[in-house]
Image (cartoon, helix red, strand yellow):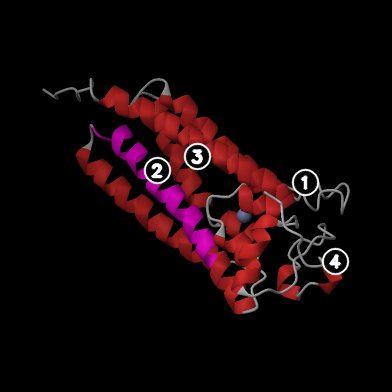
Amino acid sequence: MACLHGPRLLNLEKTPPHLQFNDLILTGYRPISTFQGCIRSLFYLHNEFGNIYTHGNVLYHTFMNHEGGEPIYDTLLSLDMVGVCLVNTLGCLPIIYITLMCYPGTCILALLSYSLISAWGILCATTARSNYGRLRAFIWQALFRVLLFLFRWLGDGVGSPASLRLFFTMDMLAIMGGLVNLSRVPERFSPGLFDYWCNSHQIMHVLVICSIIYMHWGMLEDLAWIKTFQCPVLE
Ligand SMILES: [Zn+2]
């Protein structure tokens, strides 16, 4: 993939302030580039290279050094956050529906509540000024899912017996990803050593991808299970 000779890369102190968001990544910054320059950076090694190729939404990492400067950067970051929120929201709505399908009134209320919480989360995530603020934006969605899984585990909610473990793993991986990104491990222990590979943001990307795979597996289990299930008729 890294087959072109790129421009001379910059050290942290030479890169514009809005791109100095991780002061433990010391080298490998792309210079400010045109649209074509950003596209070209898909093919040479720099410190966002690994982030681009481990991400579902590549726009933010590919174009963050665009010559449009901070306004373009802020817009791309917001788009990135909207993408994360949409996965969080749309991925969970079927889980809510299946868990509460035998309580239609509660089910509709829960779907509406989760959608409202998600809208609030998108607003918080796109206006937050720090990684901590962005992680905090997802807390209410996570707590809602904990309650939902508890309801299923206690036997009041329904769903495939195999899927709960998969959904739990899904959330654990996503939380671990958020915490790794926030704590900036491993570059915290050796600033500069992880500039190109295996830094916290790349590890978070990989954990989030694994989390989405577990969501997919859990949903496949539930969809197979739902074909043979009928809610008990109340006398
Ligand atoms: Zn990212």
Mark pair 1, 3: CA separation = 22 Å
Q: Nearer the viewer, residue 102 or 89?
A: 89
Ligand 1 neighbours mark 4 (CB distance < 8 Å):
no
Report the residue at 28% width, 48% height from top. Answer: 109
Q: Which residues are magenta?
A: 78-101
Horizontal side of 98 relative to 105 (left or right) equals right
Numbered disc total: 4
Q: Nearer the viewer, residue 140 or 129?
A: 129
**Residue 108, how many percent across, how many down?**
25, 46
Q: Amino acid at mark 4?
A: Asn
Q: Do labels 1 and 4 touch, CB within 8 Å?
A: no
Work out whether mark 2 precedes mark 4 in sequence or the reverse, and give the earlier one: 4
Q: Which residue is mark 2?
A: 92
Mark pair 4, 3: CA separation = 34 Å
Q: Which mark is residue 11?
A: 4
**Residue 140, how many percent across, how many down?**
49, 51
Q: Secondary structure at mark 1?
A: loop
Q: Which residue is mark 1?
A: 185
Where is the C terminus found, in terms of image quarters? top left
**Residue 3, how many percent across, how many down?**
71, 52
Q: Nearer the viewer, residue 168 or 51?
A: 51
10 Å neighbourhood of mark 3: few (<14), some, or many (≥20)?
Answer: many
Q: Do labels 2 and 4 touch, CB within 8 Å?
A: no
